[in-house]
Image (cartoon, grey):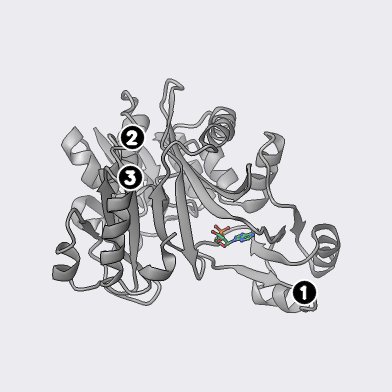
């Protein structure tokens, strides 16, 4: 079976790495000749809106999936008319726009921070009165890794925030004083069966995920699974879905969902019986899903902007190194590291050792 992937970044690369042992082949479409999934695929170098390239992708493959949610809606409509697209286009349309996404959470009884739509400067004033300050003004679409967001505090000029995000459709969200950020990665197959990974605890800095670890029998796991099940069923979902939450005591407030494999699930490659990448492929291909149980206590560290000396990293016992084959640039995700240990104290010790080699890790550790 040949699987088409829209987007050729590290997520597509790790999907391909997981898929070859199962006998899958891959065609990837990406507008950049340097896309890091290129060496692992038949590669179509074209814009996502290129009708000829989209038709080639549809005819060359048995089904199409995607590695990011900012795929143009017309591209998905065109593909959907000719082939199977998973996760379903409706899930993509909801997840790529923060307003319908947050409204869906609310409709399904999933808690969120207070929010209000902002389409004009006047509407921003109404939203500030409704949501209160401090708050975050976020563009409805195309925001990622903290981009397209401005924090508004009491005394700030809302007009300046509105101009900083480019006066585009947005939402204003109350700033949540959370205790932790957690995410749930789950998967649903073509026959409607679903599985859930253990929750991940996530640390962000400057809007970018730095560190994730798997949580062992966390008391909030059942609530997160209940919320996830509502979304999976409402969207008639197929594939891996990730949901990011803010935790306040016993409550989970949904921040956003990603209709794809997710950075906070990278630890599942070595830390779960079946990785999120393999399970996404099994799901979209209509195959039985794999076991999502953890193999131990896992931690994942993103390598951002620079890669520490490989020798020093590999000298840490048990360390798994994943480099994406990208050239270094500030703020760019270049790879990740995973540690999996039976004993959580052992994991802590190894992370402390790793912190001597990875700049900034010390401050990201829980
Ligand atoms: P997002 O692009 O929505 O995932 O936001 C990136 C990061 O900004 C989140 O992971 C949080 O660390 C922070 N953030 C976003 N929205 C809020 C909020 N409403 N309250 C507090 N922190 C937030």
- For the question of whether residue 119 can be seen, the reply is yes
Mark 2 is surrounded, within 10 Å at the Cα level, by few (under 14), some (14 to 19) or many (20 or more) other residues, namely many
The answer to whether the residues at label 3 and label 2 have Cβ atoms under 8 Å apart is no
Give me the C-alpha separation between circle 1 and circle 3: 44 Å
Q: Quick check: 141 above or below 265?
A: below
Residue located 59% across and 55% down the image: 179
- Which residue is tagged 2? 279
Which quarter holds ligand 1? bottom right
Residue located 73% across and 79% down the image: 160
Please state which of the two labelled residues, at mark 3 or mark 2, is closer to the viewer. Answer: 3
> In x, y percent, where is residue 208?
46, 65
Q: If you read the primary sequence from the N terminus, does the residue marked by circle 1 or circle 3 appear first?
A: 1
Task: Work out which quarter of the rendered image holds the C terminus and state it.
Answer: bottom left
Residue located 20% across and 52% down the image: 40
Residue located 46% across and 35% down the image: 81
Q: Secondary structure at mark 3?
A: strand
Give me the C-alpha separation between circle 3 and circle 2: 20 Å
């Amino acid at each position: 079976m040949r699987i088409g992937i829209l987007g050729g970044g590290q997520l597509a690369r790790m999907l391909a790495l997981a898929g070859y042992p199962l006998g899958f082949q891959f065609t990837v479409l990406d507008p950049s000749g340097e896309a890091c999934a290129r060496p692992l695929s038949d590669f179509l170098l074209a814009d996502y809106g290129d009708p000829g390239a989209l038709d080639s992708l549809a005819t060359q493959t048995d089904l199409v999936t995607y590695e990011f949610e900012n795929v143009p809606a017309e591209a998905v409509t065109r593909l959907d008319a000719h082939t199977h697209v998973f996760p379903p286009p409706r899930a993509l349309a909801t997840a790529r726009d923060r307003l319908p996404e947050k409204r869906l959470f609310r409709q399904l009884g999933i808690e969120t921070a207070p929010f209000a739509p902002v389409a004009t400067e006047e509407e921003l004033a109404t939203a500030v009165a409704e949501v209160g300050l401090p708050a975050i003004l976020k563009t409805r679409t195309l925001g990622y890794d903290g981009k397209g967001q401005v924090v508004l505090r009491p005394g700030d000029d809302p007009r300046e925030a509105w101009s900083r995000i480019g006066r585009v459709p947005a939402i204003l969200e109350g700033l949540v004083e959370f205790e932790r950020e957690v995410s749930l990665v789950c998967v649903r197959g073509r026959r409607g069966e679903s599985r859930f990974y253990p929750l991940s605890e996530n640390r962000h800095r400057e809007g970018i995920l730095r560190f994730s670890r798997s949580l062992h029998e966390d008391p909030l796991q059942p609530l997160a699974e209940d919320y996830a099940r509502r979304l999976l069923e409402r969207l008639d979902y197929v594939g891996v879905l990730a949901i990011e939450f803010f935790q306040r005591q016993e409550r989970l407030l949904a921040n956003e969902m990603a209709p794809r494999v997710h950075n906070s699930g990278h630890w599942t490659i070595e830390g779960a019986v079946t990785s999120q990448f393999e399970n996404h492929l099994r799901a979209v291909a209509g195959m039985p899903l794999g076991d999502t149980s953890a193999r131990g206590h896992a931690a994942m560290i993103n390598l951002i902007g620079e890669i520490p000396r490989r020798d020093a990293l590999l000298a840490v016992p048990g360390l798994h190194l994943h480099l994406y084959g990208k050239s270094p640039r500030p703020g760019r995700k270049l790879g990740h590291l995973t540690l999996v240990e039976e004993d959580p104290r052992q994991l802590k010790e190894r992370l402390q050792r790793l912190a001597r080699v990875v700049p900034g890790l010390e401050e990201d550790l829980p």
